[in-house]
């Protein structure tokens, strides 16, 4: 999907890449904000005393470790996830800004398409634990913008050679990105456990 939102692909559909890409980024931001806000609202239904308790901290740490273990399993299909993707037919049915915003909104919301890393679930988990709208919005905004950022790498892709060269680079970096995501989950679990233990000391 990402390869299609390039100057090369947009030119073939008589669309402007800058318009489609901007709609994609803004859609992803809105999706992330919605994810964070809804998760924080759901978390606020839990008693504040429980959310700030040691039990809550250890539950979150356990969920992070569980996600990490599922990510480490071979095949990458152990993680609970929807088995759907954005509708590729939108590109031939709608204007660039429409499918750009639609794709971005779904990917920014994160959990309504295929989830390939447990880090996606960490965002609503932390937003729910906070139970605070501001925290949820901040987490969601960061998630949505980071989720959309790769599209900016396609800004100079005006021909097939440039597209293939870019994806060769991304392929070389894929393993490093995967390790970084797993390390982030592990570090988050350690940090939550340490903070929880220290608070109860």
Image (tube, rainbow, N blue to C red):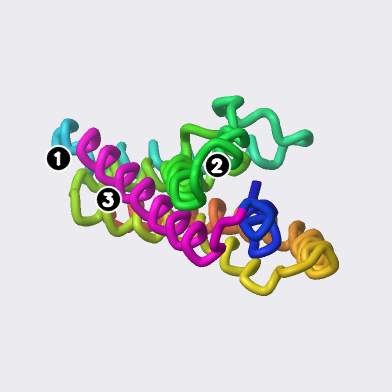
Which residues fall within the magenta stretch? Answer: 14-43
Q: Residues within 10 Å of mark 1 (few under 14, many from 20)?
A: few
| First in sequence: mark 1 vs mark 3 | 1
Residue at image location 56% in from the left, 28% down from the top: 81
Assign a secondary structure to mark 1.
Answer: helix
Whether 100 is among the magenta residues is no
The answer to which of 181 and 109 lies nearer the viewer is: 109
Camera-side mark, 1 or 3: 3
Note whether residue 68 is visible.
no
Q: What residue is rendered at 40% in x and 41% in y? A: 60
User: Residue 49 bears which disc, if any?
Assistant: 1
User: Label 2, on which residue?
Assistant: 118
Say which mark, if any, is on residue 7: none
Instruction: Look at the picture and state if 4 lies above or below 84.
Output: below
Using the image, determine if residue 199 lies above or below residue 163.
above
The residue at which mark 3 appears reads as 136
Q: Residues within 10 Å of mark 3 (few under 14, many from 20)?
A: many
Q: Earlier in the sequence, mark 2 or mark 3?
A: 2
Is residue 145 something that shows in the picture? yes
Q: CA distance from mark 2 to mark 1?
A: 27 Å
Q: Position of residue 116 (x, y in %)?
A: 62, 40
């Amino acid at each position: 999907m990402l390869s299609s939102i390039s100057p090369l692909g947009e030119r073939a559909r008589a669309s402007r890449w800058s318009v489609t890409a901007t709609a994609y980024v803004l859609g992803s931001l809105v999706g992330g904000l919605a994810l964070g806000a809804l998760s924080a609202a759901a978390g606020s239904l839990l008693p504040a005393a429980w959310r700030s308790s040691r039990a809550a901290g250890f539950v979150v740490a356990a969920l992070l470790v569980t996600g990490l273990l599922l990510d480490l399993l071979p095949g990458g299909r152990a993680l609970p996830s929807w088995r759907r993707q954005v509708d590729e037919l939108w590109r031939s049915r709608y204007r660039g800004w429409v499918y750009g915003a639609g794709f971005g909104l779904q990917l920014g919301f994160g959990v309504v398409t295929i989830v390939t890393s447990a880090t996606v679930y960490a965002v609503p988990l932390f937003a729910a634990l906070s139970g605070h709208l501001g925290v949820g919005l901040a987490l969601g905004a960061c998630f949505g913008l980071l989720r959309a950022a790769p599209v900016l790498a396609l800004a100079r892709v005006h021909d097939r050679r440039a597209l293939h060269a870019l994806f060769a680079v991304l392929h070389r970096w894929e393993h490093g990105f995967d390790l970084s995501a797993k390390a982030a989950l592990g570090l988050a679990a350690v940090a939550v456990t340490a903070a929880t233990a220290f608070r109860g000391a």
